[in-house]
Amino acid sequence: MSGHSKWHNIQKTKGAADAKRSAAFTKIAREIIVAVKEGGSGDPNNNSRLATVIAKAKAVNMPNDNIKRTIDKALGAGNTDSYEAVTYEGYGPGGVAVIVEALTDNRQRTAPEVRHAFDKCNGNLGAIGCVSWSFDKKGVIVIDNEEGELDEETVMMDALDAGAADFEADGPALEITCDPDAFNDVVKALEEKGYSFVNAEVEMVPQNYITLSGEGDVKNMQKLIDMLEDNDDVQNVWHNWDND
C-alpha cells in the first residue's frame, strides 16, 4: 500500500506474508469505518468513498465477509470508533519525497511517532505542501498478466472504453490509470468484463523518481518505509524512490 505505481514484481505483491496481509486488512477496515461514517451509508452505490475502499480491499483479497462485517460494525449504534485523516510530508535519505497518510484517534501519539521514524532514518519531516506538489493524484488499477493469457490491446481498449486515461504494459503487469473522480466507474466497468486486480486504489503518483546510489541511503530509506508501514495509524506511504 505504498511506493509508486511500478509493478515489475507481481509475485511480491501477490505473495505477501500472512502478517502483512493481516495488517493490511486491519488498516483497510479502519478506512471502511471512516468511509461509512463520513458517507452516511453502508451501500457503495450511494457512497463513492466506500466504493473506492472496497475496490482496494478486494484487490488485496480481503474476504467479502470481512468487508460486510466491518460495514455492519460501522453502522452499529454502539460503534464509537472515531478517526481523523492526517497527512505528513517530508524527505527521506537523499532527498526522496515522502507523503504519509494516516487515520488516527490521537494526533498527539501519531505525529511524534512519524517524526521519530524520519529522524531515525536520516530524513526530516517538513511542512504540509513541501513535497505533495510533485505528486499527482490518480486512480491506479493493476491487472496481473504474468501467464500472458490476456491480450494487451483488448485490455487497453476495454480500459479506455471504461473511462481510463492511460494504459501501460509493464512486464507482467497491465497498469491502468484514470482520473480519481472516474475511478469507481472504471473499476466497476472492468469488473463487469471479468477482470480482477492486484491493485486498485487512488494513489499519489510522483512526477519524477530519485535513485539512491549509497548503500547507507538505500538501507535507511527501506527502514523508513518499514517503520512507517508498521505503524498502526499509517494507511499509506507514498514516495518517489525508484527502488525497482
Image (tube, rainbow, N blue to C red):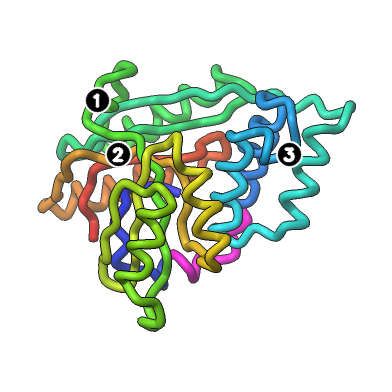
Place of residue 131 in the rendered image (x, y in percent of width and height, measured from the top left): 25, 26
Q: Residue at x 74, y 53 (%)?
A: 66
Q: Residue at x 77, y 56 (%)?
A: 65
Residue at the disc numbered 3 = 43
Say left or right for 173 vs 190.
left
User: Considering only order in the chain, which callout, 1 or 2, is on the residue closer to the N terminus?
Assistant: 2
Please state which of the two labelled residues, at mark 1 or mark 3, is closer to the viewer. Answer: 3
Report how far apart the C-alphas of labels 1 and 3 lie in the structure: 34 Å
Q: Is residue 221 visible?
A: yes
User: Considering only order in the chain, which callout, 3 or 2, is on the residue closer to the N terminus?
Assistant: 3
Discs 2, 3 touching: Cβ within 8 Å = no
Confirm whether the magenta stretch covers residue 16: yes
The amino acid at mark 2 is Cys
Report how far apart the C-alphas of labels 2 and 3 lie in the structure: 42 Å
Q: Residues within 10 Å of mark 3 (few under 14, many from 20)?
A: few
Q: Secondary structure at mark 3?
A: loop
Q: Residue at x 73, y 25 (%)?
A: 40
- Number of dots carrying numbers: 3
Residue at the disc numbered 2 = 121
**Magenta stretch, residue numbers:** 13-22
Q: Secondary structure at mark 1?
A: helix
Place of residue 229 in the rendered image (x, y in percent of width and height, measured from the top left): 46, 45
Residue at the disc numbered 1 = 133
The amino acid at mark 1 is Trp
Q: Residues within 10 Å of mark 1 (few under 14, many from 20)?
A: few
The amino acid at mark 3 is Asp
